[in-house]
Image (cartoon, rainbow, N blue to C red):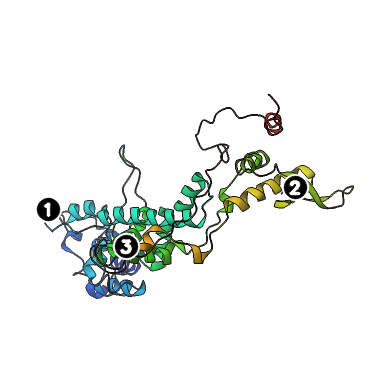
């Protein structure tokens, strides 16, 4: 077997193209340029990428993700795995062949649905989460990198048909992860079209929203003590006070202090550090985290899209209407925001002395 043949079969194995389905090799375009006697350069990897994935691989993929009843046809799966960038490559080498269907419209619809499901789920689960953190959490759950990672876990990499595109003045470069992310989005749209909105939400819940995301690391504060004071005042509680709970090694090289922050008799948070200032900083940060990351119990969690029926047809006429009780809206976040990157021009804030004097009824 020649070098070109070995490269072809190696590329075909990586792309999950069965050798029994390959056309006669070498193709005519690999030997001579049409209407000339000059030899032609042949790229086996490009030729293998132009070949459609086998029907058996498409059917196995549909059964592997548990959607054989939705992705009942191999053509449907092939469309969900064909990125719109593949059209340029197909038109270049097969100009007379019909244009293959792509997942462009499905991916756009699926992206909107996934954003809807993630937003309502996170807002219902964490009602006090700041807006900036909520947006970051939605991206962490259903963003492009997460969709590409889920597609890899599904085993969709060998089925993807795409073509790398360079950066243009109108659009950025198309990477493999960007094209791969379109597959879960297209599948979400297919589930929505073929079954119901509830089934699409269940699919997103199973593959995306059930993953654990560290929301605590997304919340950062320049001055957590001041942010805590403003937050406590907004809720109408007593001004927070720091108290030393434990200490050890005060006069040694490695002292440890444990500080708690209290509002009246309620302890809001606790922190430790090698100095009192560091422990107080961490205690204030812990207090804010406990507020913002307060989670609604799972048995009380309900989202608006859960009221739609599972049946097919008109959602306003088919199925019974499910009762819905909206959750309590979380308090609006303080203008202080976090990390100072909210791009909100806040009004001039009173100083701590002015706040204290106002509470005591003095004229300032």
Name the residue rendered at 54%, 63% in the picture: 297
Residue farthest along the left direction in this orientation: 35
Q: Residues within 10 Å of mark 1 (few under 14, many from 20)?
A: few
Q: Quadrant of residue 101?
A: bottom left
Q: Residue furthest right?
A: 251
SS state under label 1: loop
What percent of the width, then of the height, locates residue 128? 54, 50
In front here: 76 or 125? Answer: 125
Marks 1 and 3 sit apart, C-alpha to C-alpha, by 58 Å
As displayed, is residue 128 above or below residue 44? Answer: above
Give the mark nearest the N terminus, 2 or 1: 1
Task: Answer with mark 2 or mark 3, whichever residue precedes in sequence.
Answer: 3
Closer to the eye: label 1 or 3: 3
Left or right of 331 on screen, residue 42: left
Q: Which residue is tagged 3?
A: 197
Tag shown at residue 279: 2
Residue where numbered disc 1 is placed = 36
Closer to the observer: label 2 or label 3?
3
Q: Which quarter of the image is occupied by the C terminus?
A: top right
SS for tag 3?
Answer: helix
């Amino acid at each position: 077997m020649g070098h070109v043949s070995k490269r072809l079969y190696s590329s075909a194995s990586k792309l999950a193209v069965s050798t029994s389905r390959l056309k006669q090799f070498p193709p005519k375009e690999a030997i001579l340029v049409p209407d000339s006697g000059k030899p032609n350069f042949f790229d086996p990897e490009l030729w293998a990428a132009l070949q459609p994935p086998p029907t058996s691989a498409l059917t196995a993929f549909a059964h592997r993700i548990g959607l054989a009843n939705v992705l009942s046809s191999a053509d449907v799966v092939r469309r969900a795995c064909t990125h719109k960038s593949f059209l340029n490559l197909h038109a270049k080498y097969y100009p007379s062949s019909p244009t293959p269907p792509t997942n462009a419209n499905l991916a756009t619809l699926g992206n909107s649905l996934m954003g809807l499901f993630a937003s309502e789920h996170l807002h219902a689960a964490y009602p006090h989460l700041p807006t900036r953190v909520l947006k970051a959490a939605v991206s962490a759950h259903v963003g492009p990198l997460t969709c590409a990672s889920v597609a890899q876990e599904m085993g969709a990499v060998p089925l993807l048909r795409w073509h790398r595109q360079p950066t243009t003045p109108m659009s950025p470069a198309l990477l493999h992860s960007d094209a791969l992310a379109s597959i879960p989005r297209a599948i979400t749209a297919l589930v929505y079209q073929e079954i119901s909105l509830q089934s699409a939400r269940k699919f997103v819940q199973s593959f995306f929203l059930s993953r654990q995301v560290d929301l605590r690391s997304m919340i950062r504060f320049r001055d957590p003590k001041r942010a805590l004071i403003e937050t406590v005042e907004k809720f109408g509680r007593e001004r927070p006070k720091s108290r030393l709970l434990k200490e050890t090694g005060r006069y040694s090289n490695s002292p440890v202090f444990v500080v708690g922050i209290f509002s009246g008799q309620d302890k809001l948070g606790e922190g430790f550090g090698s100095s009192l200032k560091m422990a107080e900083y961490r205690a204030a940060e812990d207090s804010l985290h406990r507020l913002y990351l307060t989670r609604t119990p799972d048995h009380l969690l309900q989202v608006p899209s859960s009221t739609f029926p599972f049946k097919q047809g008109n959602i306003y006429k088919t199925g019974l209407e499910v009762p819905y009780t909206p959750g309590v809206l979380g308090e609006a976040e303080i203008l202080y925001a976090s990390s100072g990157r909210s791009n909100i021009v806040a009004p001039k804030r009173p100083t701590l002395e002015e706040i204290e004097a106002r509470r005591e009824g003095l004229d300032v």
